[in-house]
């Protein structure tokens, strides 16, 4: 578990949680617990994605994947344990109403309406039956839901109101979609099956611009704004 969680990475999702918490006017420390939780969920998903039954990847971040280092059985259990730990961590929040809301959102993002559902949809579609609408649905579920939830968790932890949370949700949806398109461009697959890299890059830039418009009315949006810009700088 430690090998996979502490093996580097950009930490985009927990940074989004902390930046959103700051943006709604709260102390970033209020977002530490949900920030840890979303990263634990993300790391669990990477362990399972790398397994031979799914993507069968042997390296991640220039190191052996969890199953190559410790064996498939241990990797499977490590992923299960990280997902379980994520919910246990949130349950330790002092404010029960905030914890309840974040637990609901995490369950939605990780389950059949989110990451698991998106993975199954990808498996069912296969390479031959893949269309752009199906691919976009997969991206929204596999990647977009957890990124959106990372933002929303910060807003909830920061005691934001419903109007603010609606803006944060839209920001997260746009950014999550853009993030996956950029990944596709860097990996040379996904979106590039249906359009050129330049066109896909323009689509990602439009989504990031839409995301930034959603938070423009907040007073402390600069940190979140910089993270949104970073998504596009990965193409440079």
Image (cartoon, rainbow, N blue to C red):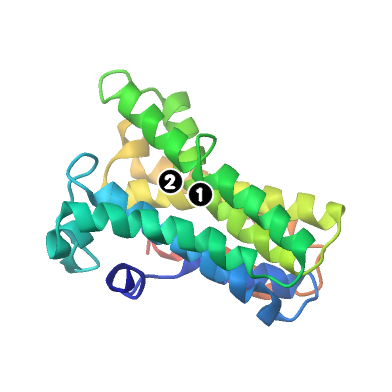
Q: Is residue 50 above or below residue 124?
A: below
What is the secondary structure assignment of the residue under circle 2? helix
Residue at image position (78%, 59%) is: 97
- State the count of labels: 2
User: Gap in Å between the C-alphas at discs 1 and 2?
Assistant: 5 Å
The residue located at (50%, 39%) in the rendering is: 141
> In the drawing, what numbered circle is on residue 66?
none
Q: Nearer the viewer, residue 69 or 12?
A: 69
Mark 2 surroundings within 10 Å by alpha-carbon count, few (fewer than 14), some (14 through 19), many (20 or more): many
Q: Residue at x 17, y 52 (%)?
A: 72
* Residues under numbered marks 1 and 2 in contact, where contact means CB atoms less than 8 Å apart: yes
Q: Is residue 229 visible?
A: no
Confirm whether residue 73 shows in the render. Answer: yes
Residue 4 as seen in the image, left or right of residue 137: left
Which residue corresponds to mark 1? 178
Q: Secondary structure at mark 1?
A: helix
Is disc 1 surrounded by few (<14), some (14 to 19) or many (20+) residues within 10 Å? many
Q: Quadrant of the C terminus?
A: bottom left
Please state, as top left, top right, bottom left or bottom right, where the N terminus lies in the image: bottom left
In-image side of 174 versus 128 (left or right):
right
Quarter residue 125 falls in = top left
Task: Tell me the quarter of the picture where residue 209 sits.
Answer: bottom right
The image quarter in which residue 221 lies: bottom right
Give the residue drawn at x 35%, y 46%: 184
Residue position marked by numbered label 2 in the rendering? 181
Question: Left of 152 or right of it: where is 112?
Answer: left
Residue, far top: 129
Estimate the x, y position of residue 231 in percent, counting from the top left.
Answer: 48, 61
Image location of residue 52, percent across then percent down: 17, 44
Question: Between 187 and 158, which is closer to the camera in this rendering?
Answer: 158
80 over 136 or under it: above or below? below
């Amino acid at each position: 578990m430690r090998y996979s969680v502490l093996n580097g990475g950009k930490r985009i999702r927990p940074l989004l949680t902390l930046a959103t918490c700051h943006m709604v006017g709260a102390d970033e420390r209020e977002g530490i617990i949900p920030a840890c939780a979303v990263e634990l969920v993300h790391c669990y998903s990477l362990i399972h994605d790398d397994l031979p039954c799914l993507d069968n990847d042997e390296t991640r971040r220039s190191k052996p994947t969890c199953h190559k280092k410790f064996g498939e059985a241990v990797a499977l259990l490590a992923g299960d344990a990280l997902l379980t730990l994520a919910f246990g961590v949130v349950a330790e929040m002092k404010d029960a109403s905030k914890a309840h809301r974040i637990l609901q959102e995490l369950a939605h993002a990780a389950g059949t309406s989110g990451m698991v559902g998106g993975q199954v949809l990808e498996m069912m579609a296969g390479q031959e039956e893949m269309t752009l609408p199906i691919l976009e649905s997969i991206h929204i579920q596999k990647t977009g839901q957890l990124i959106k939830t990372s933002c929303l968790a910060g807003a909830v932890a920061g005691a934001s109101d419903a109007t603010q949370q609606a803006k944060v949700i839209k920001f997260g949806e746009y950014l999550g979609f853009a993030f996956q398109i950029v990944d596709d461009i860097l990996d040379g697959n996904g979106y590039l099956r249906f359009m050129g890299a330049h066109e896909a890059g323009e689509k990602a830039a439009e989504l990031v611009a839409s995301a930034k418009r959603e938070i423009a009315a907040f007073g402390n949006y600069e940190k979140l704004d910089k993270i949104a810009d970073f998504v596009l700088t990965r193409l440079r």
